[in-house]
Amino acid sequence: MVGNLCGWAEGQVTVSYTHLRAQETDALKTMEKYNSEIVQWAEYFEIPTAMLQSVIFREMICYGLDDVVGDRILPDASVGLAQIKPTTAIKAVQMVYGGPCQYSQEEMKKQLWNPHNSIYYAAMVLKMEAIRLDYTNTNDLTREQIQEVITKYNGDPSYGAATILY
């Protein structure tokens, strides 16, 4: 039993330790593959690189059956490498850049399936959440502030505390 590693309720899902380790190994390989882009977008949006890395890693290792099903049937399901909802990405564009987004919800969903775009929008969403929390110097956040921004990224109160550990 995995417990609450990925936010699953006790007894809801049984996952083998071997399967979880395989997901972590695959996620680490993916992180290594895209690391230069992660660093690039973290620097561009002036957010801690480790914050962006931890969110993307967490989203990859916790991708489950509910995500697979939701991706196919829900118009605003979180999708892509960083599991972002299209409406959230659109709001981030509007807040961070101060203008309208050029993509419709459906077009944004297609954009988010691209790993390169997913990393870019994940950084932008983290920047948006820091702005919403009135954190002006986003490159110099305390551990508590980073945890709060990460929590806002997902919306689940326990997400930040678990994700910051990565």
Image (cartoon, rainbow, N blue to C red):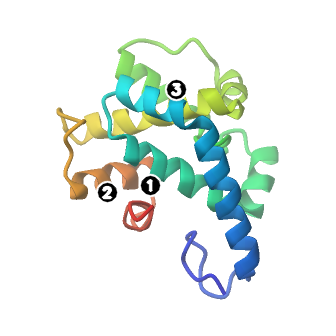
Determine whether, in the image, residue 69 is placed left or right of residue 164. Answer: right
Please give the residue where the numbered disc 2 appears in the rendered image: 147
> Which mark sits nearer the N-terminus, 2 or 3?
3
Amino acid carrying label 1: it is: Gly
Indicate the position of residue 38 as horizontal and vertical percent values: 49, 34
Indicate the position of residue 59 as horizontal and vertical percent values: 59, 54
Viewer-proximal residue, 52 or 30? 30
Which quarter of the figure is the C terminus placed in?
bottom left
In terms of image quadrants, where is residue 140? top left
Please give the residue where the numbered disc 3 appears in the rendered image: 90
Label number found at residue 155? 1
Viewer-proximal residue, 85 or 58? 58
Amino acid carrying label 3: it is: Ile
Circles 2 and 3: CB atoms closer than 8 Å: no
Q: Residue at x 64, y 19 (%)?
A: 104
**For residue 118, above or below residue 158:** above
